[in-house]
Image (cartoon, grey):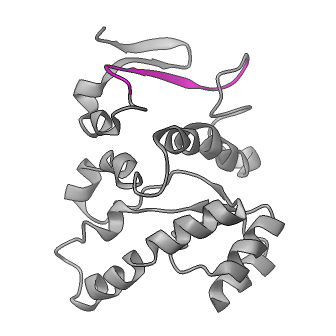
Amino acid sequence: MGGNKQAIDAGVRSIEHGNLIDEEIAQMMVENGMWLSPQVLVYRAFSADLRPARPEKGRLVEAGLGDMFSLAKECGIKSVFGTDVVVNPRACADQNKEFAARLDWVTPAKILTRATANSGEVLQLSGYRSPYPGVVGRIVEGAHADLLLTNGNSVEDFTILEDYDAAIAFIMKAGVINRENM
């Protein structure tokens, strides 16, 4: 856990993955107002071009997912929705499966909050480097927000988000309707 302690001491604001955090690190994250950005799908869709040792190590890290999600909940770690599948083109095409991949540990409503409002808060940590000025991730006057409406209730059936084209009925970006299939 030395790397996590070093990151915390250096002022890092977000830990990516975090599958192997322990209770001490979880408490330190809370005390320092840090964010956790877990990814699930990356451990279930290994690229064929990886050396043989990498998938084996990845499975060991995958085994830590349950403990990490439990610690995050117990300790109250602020979490966002992250995906990390860019090294695998097939997995990248399936990245919306990340929503349902978290259902063993997190409710659909919390997953959506982490993907929108919480992720917007983390994005704002980049300050002037943020590509989106002002408030992000919330539907409030003056905020930079996109609005998506789905065909169906994604809180009741998260699997509808896996087929983006069928699920998304309406998209508004920066006040402009980009798609309307209602």
Query: Is residue 150 shown in magenta?
Result: yes
| Occupied quadrant, residue 72 | bottom right
| Occupied quadrant, residue 86 | bottom left
In the picture, the quarter occupied by the N terminus is bottom right
In the picture, the quarter occupied by the C terminus is top left
- The residue closer to the viewer here, 127 or 73, is 73
Residue at 28 percent of width and 39 percent of height: 159
Number of numbered discs: 0
Let me know if residue 138 appears in the view. Answer: yes
Residue 118 location in percent, x, y? Answer: 64, 44
Q: Is residue 24 above or below residue 13?
A: below
Q: Which residues are magenta?
A: 142-153
Residue 139 location in percent, x, y? Answer: 64, 22
Residue at 79 percent of width and 71 percent of height: 11
In the rendered structure, the answer to whether residue 88 lies left or right of residue 58 reads left
Residue 91 location in percent, x, y? Answer: 25, 57
In the rendered structure, the answer to whether residue 126 lies left or right of residue 20 reads right
Q: Is residue 173 above or below residue 94?
A: above
In the rendered structure, the answer to whether residue 109 lies left or right of residue 41 reads right
